[in-house]
Image (cartoon, rainbow, N blue to C red):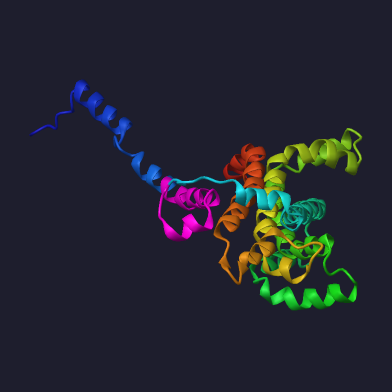
Amino acid sequence: MATQQSPSPAAATSVAHVKREGPKFSWIVPLVYIVFLMIPIYWLVVISFKSNFEVMNSFSIIPQDPTLRNYKVILTDSSWYLGYVNSITYVLMNMVISLLIALPAAYAFSRYRFVGDKHLFFWLLTNRMAPPAVFALPFFQLYSAFGLIDTHIAVALAHCLFNLPLAIWILEGFMSGIPKEIDETAYIDGYSFPKFFIKIFIPMIASGIGVAAFFCFMFSWVELLIARTLTTTSAKPISAIMTRTVSATGMDWGVLAAAGALTLIPGVLVIWFVRNYIAKGFALGRV
């Protein structure tokens, strides 16, 4: 009867070595993907250093006659740079409000069971699913009645309708991963609930807070419809001010590109400061 011969140790080592190495050019696909994503950003920055004449009459991947005039217009004109101040103001206010409300709410969903808890949790998420256009008119009438139109707090509170459910959902996932025995042990050791929540529980979900803050910032920073509906002059965001580049002489492409390039900076800074929390959040939490 024929017997099956086992491969020699040298052959087995060679096969294992080949499997461990993998394809030699596996880095090409992610490199091409990254380059593809960076092309619009690169082109935006390039246009920001060009004059309108060069943008309209020539094509070049590098500015032929670089100019800082576009950035000077934005940084010296109060009607431009105040748009960034307004946007950052209501975005930060929204982040603080959303997190302050989401932390105890997520703890309640994570630690307690009550009538209709799952239905309420799902209802919160449905607010995030609805398009902003659905709430634009009700928000406008409501804030007009209370005299809050053209204020930062109006936009910050309106954005809570979308960011608060998302923050609760993210934080609840992190909190559910922490055993309840930690809460009981803290109470036995004499900790009051506020002291336990601030000194013990919050540091344990720091990654979740970082992830929730990042998403609140991102969605509030890029939202335009509600922010534009609820503001006129004093609290007008930069995304709405950028539409002023259209005039009788045409589109001011250079200034528009410079404004767009500057709007990327706050997002990059936020990602840089919470990058470690985001990585842990995608690995461990509910994102």
Q: 175 and 88: which one is in front?
A: 88
Query: Which x, y percent locates residue 145?
Result: 89, 76
Asked whether 50 falls inside the magenta stretch, the response is yes
Query: Which x, y percent locates residue 255?
Result: 60, 56
Q: 48 and 30: which one is in front?
A: 48
Spot the residue most to the top: 10
Residue at left offset 60%, top offset 72%: 248
Q: Which residues are magenta?
A: 35-61
Position of 26 with respect to 154 (left or right) is left
Query: Which x, y percent locates residue 9?
Result: 22, 21
Q: Main secondary structure of the magenta part?
A: helix
User: Which quadrant of the figure has residue 159?
Assistant: bottom right
Indicate whether 96 appears above or below 117.
above
Q: In what quadrant of the picture does the N terminus appear?
A: top left
The answer, for residue 286, to whether it is visible in the render is no
Asked whether 185 falls inside the magenta stretch, the response is no
Indicate whether 127 appears above or below 5.
below
Q: 21 and 108: which one is in front?
A: 21
Residue at left offset 44%, top offset 45%: 62
Residue at left offset 84%, top offset 40%: 198
